[in-house]
Amino acid sequence: MPRGKYTNHKGRNRKFTNPEELEEERRKEEQKKRWRQQHGGDSSSDESEGDKKSNDEESGSEEEESSSDEDNAGKAKGVSNLIEIENPNRVQKKLKKVTKLDTADLAEKPQLSRREREEIEKQKAQAHYQKLHAEGKTDQARADLARLAIIRQQREDAKKRREVEQKEREDAAKAKTAATQKALGKK
């Protein structure tokens, strides 16, 4: 027993087959194969074809391959050949030849979803509105231009008032200096 709390049971129940048992199984398989060959079983047909191919490769190798492919394709496993089932959900790929493709289908624009169409229309409408706005043809553009004209007028009036006030200050300063000069008698 290993010391400690944890034990590992991985290697305890391993069994190895004896070489005698393996040899016995191999012999039984060979006997089954012989019996099938004698009685014409299905599995021996594959082996017998392989033997025939190795004996005379040149004469009929192609014929045997094609006939075995046809037999395998013709026979279906189980009851699938008895019952015909069509699954409506199963989509089989249909191969198209390049020569049969319609070039008109490729030239058409792909169908857009509703959301994509609405998004494109929205972008076109916005671009059209921006164009009209830049030209001053929309109500908002007219209101903006009127507001800008009023602001420009106000700024011009304020500028004129400042210029007038500045001239008055300069005149007042000149008058004051002239009065002080007169008082001092310098001029």
Image (cartoon, helix red, strand yellow):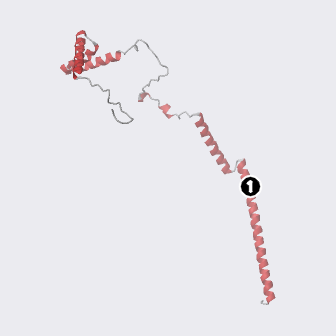
Q: Which residue is mark 1?
A: 147
Q: Image height check: is 89 above or below 121?
A: above
Classify mark 1: helix, strand or loop.
Answer: helix
Between residue 20 and residue 39, name the one nearer to us: 20
Between residue 36 and residue 59, name the one nearer to us: 36
Task: State the image quarter where residue 63 is shown.
Answer: top left
Crowd class of label 1 (few under 14; some 14 to 19; many from 20; radius 10 Å): few
Task: State the image quarter where residue 81 is shown.
Answer: top left
**Residue 138 location, x and y as percent?**
70, 47
Residue 65 makes an appearance in the image: yes
**Residue 139 location, x and y as percent?**
72, 47
Between residue 175 and residue 31, name the one nearer to us: 31
Would residue 16 appear left or right of 172 to someone viewing this image? left
Residue at 33% across / 17% down in the picture?
A: 72
Which quarter of the rendering shows the N terminus? top left
Q: Image height check: is 108 above or below 182?
A: above
Residue at 66% across / 45% down in the picture?
A: 129
**Residue 42 location, x and y as percent?**
28, 13
Residue at 72% across / 52% down in the picture?
A: 144
